[in-house]
Image (cartoon, helix red, strand yellow):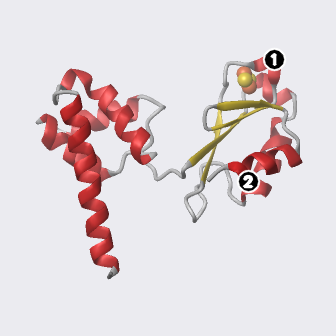
């Protein structure tokens, strides 16, 4: 199969997925946030092609969708890996050596904060506060939080990520 055919197949699958999600929510503009969350759950991010399809499905301007997608920090308009790793750099974590944790994580993953690995396995982000300051420094891998994980603990956790 040529690369072009494979990409076309991916685009069609993406469009079908967006249509399926829109149908599930009866194509209601009032449910735009829920729809965006579900699309992002499926794709790990919000690609332009998905938002264009969403605009057509809900019959609302693309500008309106971008306003919502850029307002909430939970949405990503940048390609994300299958596993999202967050290192907290809030004040409480910072004083408990969050910078050391960041260098530990960047070394293990081979990417810097804001980057995604070339195999799309990991995206690394830094965040302001994860809401569990007493556990700092905190690392979140997908939805699991870890308090001051050692290098070997992180290595084991990253190896378990698909
Ligand atoms: S500052 Fe890190 S969890 Fe609050």
Left-right relation of 57 to 151? left
Instruction: Please provide percent x and percent y for residue 21.
Output: 26, 37
If the image is split into quadrants, where does the N terminus sit? bottom left
Number of the label disc, if any, that sits on residue 48: none
Front-most of residues 130 and 157: 157
Which residue position holds label 2? 159
Mark 1 crowd level (few <14, some 14–19, many ≥20, 10 Å Cα): few
At 38% from the left and 32% from the top, the residue drawn is 37
**Furthest residue toward bottom:** 2
Left-right relation of 128 to 40? right
The quadrant in which residue 149 appears is top right
At 51% from the left and 50% from the top, the residue drawn is 80
Tell how many labels.
2
Instruction: Please provide percent x and percent y for residue 47.
Output: 35, 51
Q: Is residue 37 above or below residue 157?
A: above
Which of label 1 and label 2 is nearer to you? 2
Whole-Å distance between the Cαs marked 1 and 2? 27 Å
């Amino acid at each position: 199969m040529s690369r072009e055919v494979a990409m076309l197949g991916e685009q069609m699958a993406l469009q079908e997925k967006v249509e399926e999600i829109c149908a599930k929510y009866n194509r209601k503009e009032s449910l735009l946030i829920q729809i965006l969350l579900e699309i992002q759950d499926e794709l790990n991010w919000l690609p332009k092609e998905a938002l264009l399809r969403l605009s057509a499905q809900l019959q609302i301007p693309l500008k309106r969708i971008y306003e919502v997608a850029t307002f909430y920090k939970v949405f990503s308009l940048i390609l994300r890996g299958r596993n999202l790793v967050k290192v907290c750099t809030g004040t409480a974590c910072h004083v408990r050596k969050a910078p050391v944790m960041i260098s530990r994580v960047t070394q293990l993953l081979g990417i810097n904060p804001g980057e995604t690995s070339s195999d799309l396995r990991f995206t690394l982000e830094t965040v302001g506060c994860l809401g569990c300051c007493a556990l700092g420094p905190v690392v979140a891998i997908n939805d699991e939080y870890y308090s001051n994980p050692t290098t070997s603990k992180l290595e084991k956790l990253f190896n378990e990520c698909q």
